[in-house]
């Protein structure tokens, strides 16, 4: 009787079919596990960023970082002006050098400014780059981050008489007066915004830009039709994109249930 030393073609095809079947079953599970892990890291990052903001307020008489100068000029438009929130929390994150030279100190502790879902912006490292659902933004001093600050929480020590076109009562006077359910920092395509519940949604969730109103800056499909948000109470929550118009972004903010979403 002749000894058989190899598989037949039929047997090989059966083995290949079984492997393909197993891969089709396992790969989606592995993909979901990887997305879940990235989501956990993102929420951990935001928790540390939120603590940095809270520590800053405790050291500055209950005021958070400022976003405008005494003439109402946005600090992001003035490269020689006061540092913005990403720089001012860096000492509380254990990175003293980031405040002065963020481009050379964005590794290590300041990696918390990057959601693991996003990649670094390409091109000139000193040039502005708006973020997307899959890319971080780059701004003042070469700062890079995946998160944006709720501008309604900016401290108003030096610009208390500047309304920036909005009623003064919409601003929170100091952090100690802020409700615990107010969004503070979350997934965003640029450094900050002044979201209104009346803002219209952008027509794309991948790359809404920063010029289509303030709330669409946060309305990005980064975590399966949701974003992660740190609230003023220090807690972290995943917010569905449809629910962004129900958050209390500023004083007097009211949920808007009449928004028509184009997606």
Image: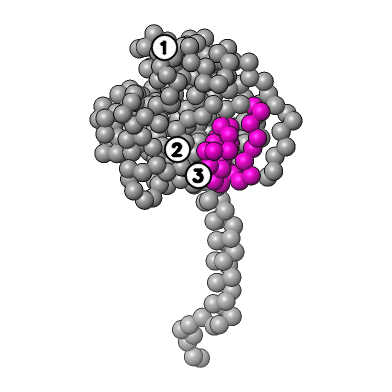
Name the residue rendered at 69%, 43% in the picture.
Answer: 262
Query: What is the CA distance from the residue labelled 3 to the residue labelled 1?
Result: 32 Å
Name the residue rendered at 57%, 27% in the picture.
Answer: 195
How many circles with numbers are drawn on the protein?
Answer: 3
Q: Residues within 10 Å of mark 2 (few under 14, many from 20)?
A: many
Farthest residue toward the bottom? 1
Q: Main secondary structure of the magenta part?
A: loop
Name the foreground residue: 98 vs 123: 123
Query: What is the CA distance from the residue labelled 2 to the residue labelled 1?
Result: 27 Å
Provide residue 238's location: percent of width, then percent of height: 57, 32
Which numbered disc, 3 or 1, marks the residue that appears first in the sequence? 3
Query: What is the CA distance from the residue labelled 2 to the residue labelled 3?
Result: 9 Å
Name the residue rendered at 61%, 21% in the picture.
Answer: 248
Name the foreground residue: 254 vs 36: 254
Q: Which residues are magenta?
A: 197-222
Q: Which mark is residue 157?
A: 1
Q: Is residue 215 magenta?
A: yes
> On the rendered structure, is 21 left or right of 256?
left
Residue at the disc numbered 2: 146
Q: Secondary structure at mark 1?
A: loop
Q: Which mark is residue 132?
A: 3
> On the rendered structure, is 149 left or right of 84?
right
Which numbered disc, 2 or 3, marks the residue that appears first in the sequence? 3
Q: Is residue 120 magenta?
A: no
Location of residue 81 with respect to 5 vertically, above or below: above
Q: Secondary structure at mark 2?
A: loop
**Quarter of the view holding residue 197:** top right
């Amino acid at each position: 009787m002749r000894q058989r030393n190899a598989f037949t073609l039929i047997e090989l095809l059966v083995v290949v079919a079984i492997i393909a079947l197993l891969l089709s079953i396992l790969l989606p599970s592995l993909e979901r596990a990887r997305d879940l892990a990235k989501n956990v890291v993102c929420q951990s990052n935001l928790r540390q960023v939120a603590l940095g903001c809270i520590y800053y307020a405790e050291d500055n008489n209950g005021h958070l970082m400022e976003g405008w100068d005494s003439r109402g000029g946005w600090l992001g438009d003035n490269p020689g002006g006061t540092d913005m929130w990403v720089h001012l929390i860096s000492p509380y994150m254990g990175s003293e050098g980031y405040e002065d030279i963020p481009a050379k100190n964005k590794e290590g502790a300041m990696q918390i400014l990057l959601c693991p879902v996003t990649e670094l912006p390409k091109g000139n490292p000193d040039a502005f780059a708006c973020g997307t659902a899959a890319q971080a933004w780059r701004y003042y001093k070469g700062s890079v981050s995946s998160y944006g600050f709720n501008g309604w929480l900016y401290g108003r020590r030096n610009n208390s008489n500047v309304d920036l076109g909005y009623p003064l009562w919409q601003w929170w006077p100091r952090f100690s007066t802020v409700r615990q359910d107010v969004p503070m920092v979350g997934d965003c395509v640029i450094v900050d915004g002044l979201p209104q519940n009346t803002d219209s949604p952008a027509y794309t969730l991948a790359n809404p830009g920063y010029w289509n109103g303030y709330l669409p800056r946060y309305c990005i499909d980064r975590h399966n039709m949701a974003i992660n948000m740190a609230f003023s109470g220090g807690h972290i929550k995943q917010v569905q994109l449809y629910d962004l118009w129900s958050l209390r972004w500023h004083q007097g903010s009211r949920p808007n249930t009449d928004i028509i979403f184009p997606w």
